[in-house]
Image (cartoon, rainbow, N blue to C red):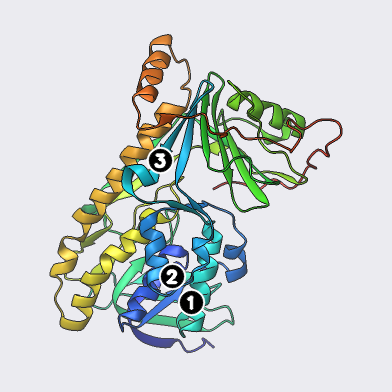
Amino acid sequence: MLEERTVVETGVVIVGAGPAGLMLSHLLSRAGIDTVVVEKRSREEIANTHRAGILEAGTVAMLTGSGVDGRVLSHGHEGTVLRFEGESRRIDFQELVGESVWLYPQNEVFTDLAAARERDGGVVHWEVTDTAVQDLTTEHPGVRCTTADGRQLEIRARLLVGADGSRGVCRRQIPADVRTDNFTEYPFAWFGILCEAPPSAPELIYAHSRHGFALISQRSDTVQRMYFQCDPATDVADWDDERIWDELQRRVDGTGRAHPAAGADLRQDGPAVPLVRVRAAAPREHVPGGGRRAHRAAHRGQGPEPRVLRRAGARPGDRRLLRHGDDSGLAGYSAKALERIWKAQNFSYWVTNLMHVAPDENPFAVKRRRGEFRRSPARSTARPTSPSPTPGGRTGPDRPRPTPATHHPRR
């Protein structure tokens, strides 16, 4: 005998409880609009998934200004360092735009947002299965799923928002005649590691050398994350700890001391995967027949900002529709969101091609990039920006080497 399905009515149903979905739910709730969020993963799984670790000023202002949590303000960076063939130049964010970026891992953003939704009585169903979008082209789209305790649930709403990522169920439901997909894939991969170690440098370092790109970054005062460019076919099993540190070392070598910080626990964050796969779809369109729904464009390697800001951009139009039946605010949402998306893509494309070594690159391309680097807004600096592995310099026999650990795919 089939179990009876529970039907719930709400203003907005959101598929996906990552930072974007929870941020939108939080903002709509503060505006007096009810939401229900469904998520296939557990709260604990998301909280323990390490992803991007830098937030820009707009996202930080949104988090703090909307009453989520002030923890995000703990680690501000006023600039970043580009290191090209051993020459370091610093981009001063405060001098150029009067803003900072904030070291705050995406899983911590999620933790704060999940706590805020729980604190405010928000409805979030974790670990749902069999999620299916219903009646997308009608005035009352819905979602069906099975809850973690086995109940059959149907959620009906005025708006349906897909915040479930590029592999989620919502993206596949957008009719082809109202969706434009754009895709590119760079011919690089990143080999990433996590290690328990003190910060290598006060600010992030993006390093280019003839051997390829390397990124010296942080996740916290005790956990550091580093990457270096590799071939997409690289097998992490071929790399022991000594080889990893040597490769990072030669990527950041140059004038002065430059050593990535070694630590007591190394996790190879592989297998190596393509550096950036960019998929962009028109985030919101009206489906013929009068139905309304939202969609997102996924941007790998960019962190949560584009997704969070797109959700916030939709909020005024959502309010007008839900309160007054006025959909004029949503009509221009795609154009506004896509303008932000392609601005972010342009920057990502520029810095990716500036700092990486392309396969079969010729000397002309190398020298052209060097000229581009020297014309960038970064300034030469003598301040100590070179990463250092230990108080005594490069890790040596008297320093404990990182121990091998489980491989974790970066997807």
Q: In the image, 152: left or right of 13?
A: right
Q: Of the residues under marks 1 and 2, which one precedes in the sequence?
A: 2
> Please, what secondary structure does the residue beneath circle 1 have?
helix
x and y, in percent, of residue 247 in the image:
66, 27
User: Going by the picture, which residue comes out furthest to the right?
Assistant: 398
Observer-nearest of 252 and 309: 252
x and y, in percent, of residue 172 in the image:
37, 57
Which is closer to the viewer, label 1 or label 2?
Answer: 1
- Whether residue 84 is visible, yes or no, is yes
Q: In the image, 243: left or right of 174?
A: right
Label 1 neighbourhood size at 10 Å, few (<14), some (14-19), many (20+)?
some
Label 3 neighbourhood size at 10 Å, few (<14), some (14-19), many (20+)?
some
Disc 3 marks which residue?
Answer: 92
Going by the numbered disc 3, the residue's amino acid type is Asp
Disc 1 marks which residue?
Answer: 116
Which is closer to the viewer, label 2 or label 3?
Answer: 3
Q: In the image, 318: left or right of 46?
A: left
Q: Place residue 10 in its image quadrant.
A: bottom left
> Please, what secondary structure does the residue beneath circle 2 have?
helix
Going by the numbered disc 1, the residue's amino acid type is Ala
Q: Of the residues under marks 2 and 3, which one precedes in the sequence?
A: 2
Disc 2 marks which residue?
Answer: 22
Label 2 neighbourhood size at 10 Å, few (<14), some (14-19), many (20+)?
many
Observer-nearest of 283 and 167: 283
Position of 257 relative to 305 (above/below): above
